[in-house]
Amino acid sequence: MVSEIPYSFLKRCASDILNGLSDGLSHFSGTSRAAVIFALGPDKPLMLCDPQKLLKGHEPVFKALYLDDQKWRHDVSVSSDKRRFAEIHAVKDLGLAGLLSNGGYSGSLFFQRWFTEHHPDLCSTGPTERWLEHAVWRFSHDMANEKELYTGISGYFLREYATHAVRDHIVDEMNRLLGWDSLIRIYPVLDAVLRISETREEGLWPEGQLLFVDPSMVHCLQFLVKFEDKERPQLANNKHVRKLLLAVDNSSRRLVSDGRFILGICDATLPPFSIRADFKGRHGFLKVNKNKVCSFADGRFGSTTFQAKLVQLEELLLESALEKADCYFLFKIAVSLVHHAQLRKHGCTIVLDLNQEPIHISGQKIVPSLDLRRPHTLNLAKSLAKVDGALHIGSDQHLHGFACLLDGRSFAGEDLARGARYNSALRFTAEHANIIVVVVSSDRPVSVIYQGVEEQGTCNIDFQTNCIFPLEPLEEWVKH
């Protein structure tokens, strides 16, 4: 019987999956926590395993959904049968702020739901949802095994699930749009994209677009160049494909593949279904039709959009004494400048001066100041950001200076592992009130600095692997 599962075995299974899930998602999306709630049977209490406090603050919601309302116990009729562990009756995501979830009912484990962070800079939630979906399946599978047969492989597999998660999401989209008869094999496509992304031609990283289409969709394309059947380069020949990408570099043209060969070069017309690799130098994006699925860089897939969301800056502005309209325009100006610097791959420093009268900063003062709410002056500011030194923007959304030098005395909060631009911002904000500095490094990291401290967008997690975590009844947890 399912209810006879030893408590120690239950803790080990849940802990192994939590470790693997958290570690794998952290490599894919940045620091990520994970948690699970589950019930062994329809009459058994809900248990919680949340060692990283991911669900803290959501206690009232869980109390209303699972304790005050017992409807979830009767939504699905599932017989207790370990042999039917793979038959998962899925449940929808709860839609909680900052969280993604996936769960379901099965014969080996009556109910379970897994949670992780919803990062603000995800290309798509699809791969992460497939990751959680697989955690559901692995937990159901482990609960169907005897303790003596347990290998602990679920955690290790989830740790390395990134490519599989991307593939599973693409296959789901392909099946939804094309049906089950597509001839494209996704794993070879993903392998080719990663290999090409790491192949330089005359010292340059690849740029351009590679379009993958189902053979049945080839007639929908407008070919500019079409290779003869016997002379089509193989997709697996990444060096040859990399050379051919030069023909579509910095253009709307696309190299076309059927998943096995390079068919030719087409224009920007898209068929009803396509997979597209958009190479942008050191990184790139994988898309299904026009929708981003994930990014890739350094030979692996990730979820980042490679554009800073600046959530920390938005929060600091909203907490300031400025009017909400002023906060909105200042935030939009800063985001536009940061994204332009990231796109052009140059570093810059932006000083947001929230004082009623802008403070004096050494540099090139602009008289009269430039209203950055106007597109042409904002474009000028983007060019001025390339000049060594900082942009000085006041609370009036005007640019008051450029090439500004941020000085300050040394203090204990400096980070010697970072450059002069970063540490100058730390010193400057430590000595001046109502100043926020946004630092964009040439290698793309963006830092928001206030009062001599970098505002962190993620929390530091002390999460030891290979640990066994305690389980807690949900009824007790919501009382804390």
Image (cartoon, rainbow, N blue to C red):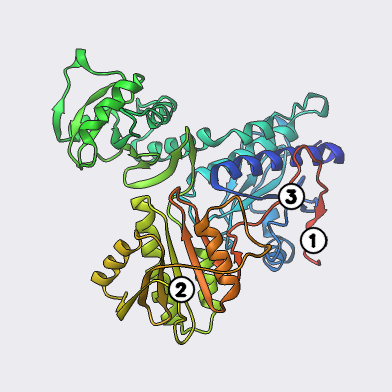
Q: Earlier in the sequence, mark 1 or mark 3?
A: 3
Q: CA distance from mark 1 to mark 3?
A: 21 Å
Q: Amino acid at mark 3?
A: Asp
The image quadrant where one finds the N terminus is top right
Q: Amino acid at mark 1?
A: Trp
Residue carrying label 1: 477
Q: Is residue 475 above or below residue 182?
A: below
- Outermost residue toward the bottom in this view: 356
Residue carrying label 2: 352
- Outermost residue toward the left in this view: 224
Label 2 neighbour load within 10 Å: few <14, some 14-19, many 20+: many
Between marks 2 and 1 in the image, the one whose residue lies nearer the viewer = 2
Q: What SS does tag 1 mark?
A: helix
Label 1 neighbour load within 10 Å: few <14, some 14-19, many 20+: some
Q: Return the mark for residue 119.
A: none
Q: Is residue 111 above or below residue 358?
A: above
Q: What SS does tag 3 mark?
A: loop
Choose top left, top right, bottom left or bottom right for residue 339. Answer: bottom left
Q: Amino acid at mark 2?
A: Leu
Q: Earlier in the sequence, mark 2 or mark 3?
A: 2
Confirm or deny contact between disc 2 and disc 3 (CB under 8 A).
no
Q: Earlier in the sequence, mark 2 or mark 1?
A: 2
Query: Residue at image x 39%, y 75%?
Result: 329
The answer to whether residue 372 is left or right of residue 327 is left
* Camera-nearest residue between 293 and 10: 293
Confirm or deny contact between disc 2 and disc 1 (CB under 8 A).
no
